[in-house]
Image: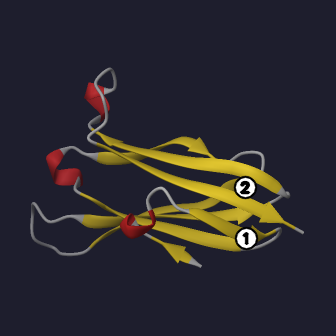
Amino acid sequence: MQFNERDDGREIKVATGQTFEVSLTENRTAGFVWNIKCGGEPVCRVVKDSFEDSSAMPGKSGIHRWQFKVDAPGTATIELVYQRPWQDKSAPARIYTLRIRAGG
């Protein structure tokens, strides 16, 4: 299962033991990065966190990917914030939320 910007605010149903991926556009050359504010614990956890450039050209954005594994049944929320690290006291430029409903 894969989720992206279009799935912001959505609730997903997943099975215990299942993995899923969240992929979001990130422009590190402008100083903006996605950070996990809430990773869905204890229902799920991040098992892989990666970034891939979509172009060798400066100023182009890339894709930040997180792979999550569902460890337990229940409900949880994944919340990611998009901001410049040195502006952590300011409101994020974007917030991405995915609600998890995990079962058997």
- Which quadrant of the figure contains the C terminus? bottom right
Q: Position of residue 21 (x, y in %)?
A: 55, 70
User: Relative to residue 49, is residue 91 depicted above or below?
Assistant: above
Residue that label 1 marks = 14
Assess whether mark 2 and mark 1 are in contact (beta carbons under 8 angstroms).
Answer: yes
Q: Residue furthest right?
A: 104
Q: Which numbered mark, 1 or 2, is in the foreground of this view?
A: 1
Tell me if mark 2 has few (under 14), some (14-19) or many (20+) residues whose alpha carbon lies within 10 angstroms of its own.
many
Q: Secondary structure at mark 2?
A: strand
- Mark number for residue 44? 2
**Amino acid tagged 1:** Val
Q: Secondary structure at mark 1?
A: strand
Q: Residue at x 16, y 52 (%)?
A: 29
Give the side of residue 87 with respect to residue 55, left or right.
right
Task: Determine which quarter of the picture holds residue 58.
Answer: bottom left
Give the side of residue 101 with respect to residue 91, left or right.
right
Q: Position of residue 81 (x, y in %)?
A: 40, 42
Count the marks: how many?
2
Give the side of residue 21 with respect to residue 15, left or right.
left
Q: Residue furthest top?
A: 89
User: Relative to residue 87, is residue 55 depicted above or below?
Assistant: below
Residue 26 or residue 72, whichever sits in front:
72
Q: Residue furthest bottom?
A: 1
Task: Determine which quarter of the picture holds residue 19.
Answer: bottom right
Q: Earlier in the sequence, mark 1 or mark 2?
A: 1
**Amino acid tagged 2:** Cys
Marks 1 and 2 sit apart, C-alpha to C-alpha, by 10 Å
User: Relative to residue 4, is residue 32 depicted above or below?
Assistant: above
- Which quadrant of the figure contains the N terminus? bottom right
Q: Residue at x 85, y 58 (%)?
A: 73
